[in-house]
Amino acid sequence: MPQIEVKYEELHAEYLGLDARGIPMSVRERYEKALGELRARLRQQAYARRLGEILLEMNAIDRNTLTRPQAEQAAEGAGLLLGEILVRRGWANSDAIGRGVERQAAGLS
């Protein structure tokens, strides 16, 4: 997995762990800013295939499930990444998203 994806995953996991224990607002803001910057960098990556397509081929989600987070993304603008929405809503598990991101980053189908 390329460095930016690894950095994002590590920071996100650290943030979720702290959030579960209750973190001060200043720390929360620092993490949210860093995660936002990494999301922006990930969006700028030129991947041969979109994550949604890969997840469909992996049978991790179905087409109907894919349209729901895409609609959320369109409504939010530059909000959460597709995988984040799928996991938060319980529509996919984080392991499947991780495998899909690895395939995407490696240029595999």
Image (cartoon, helix red, strand yellow):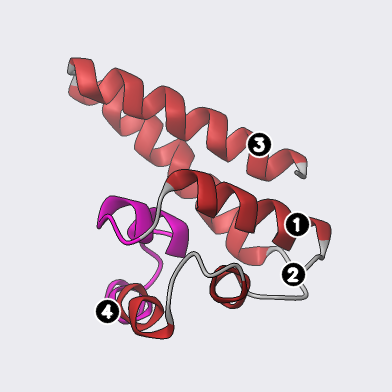
Question: What residue would you read off at disc 4?
Answer: 75
- Range of magenta residues: 70-91
Q: Is residue 89 visible?
A: yes
Which residue position is annotated with label 3?
Answer: 6
Q: Residue 24: which quarter of the image?
A: top left
Q: Amino acid at mark 4?
A: Ala
Q: Nearer the observer, disc 4 or disc 2?
A: 2
Say which label, 1 or 2, has the lower sequence index: 2
In the rendered image, which residue does mark 2 sit on? 47
Residue at far front of view? 59
Q: Which mark is residue 1?
A: none
- Three-letter code for the amino acid on which mark 1 is drawn: Ala
The span from disc 1 to disc 2 (Cα, nearest Å) is 7 Å
Q: Nearer the viewer, residue 98 or 5?
A: 98
Q: Residue at x 55, y 46 (%)?
A: 38
| Magenta: main secondary structure | helix
Check disc 1: other Cα within 10 Å, few if <14, some if 14-19, many if 20+.
Answer: some
Q: Are marks 4 and 2 in contact (CB under 8 Å)?
A: no
Number of the front mark, 4 or 3: 3
Under mark 3, the amino acid is Val
Using the rendered image of the protein, determine whether residue 23 is visible from the camera's viewpoint: no
| Disc 4 to disc 3, C-alpha distance | 27 Å
> What residue did someone put label 1 on?
105
Q: Secondary structure at mark 1?
A: helix
Q: Are dots 1 and 4 in contact, CB under 8 Å?
A: no
Q: What residue is shown at x 75% (from left), y 44% (from top)?
A: 1
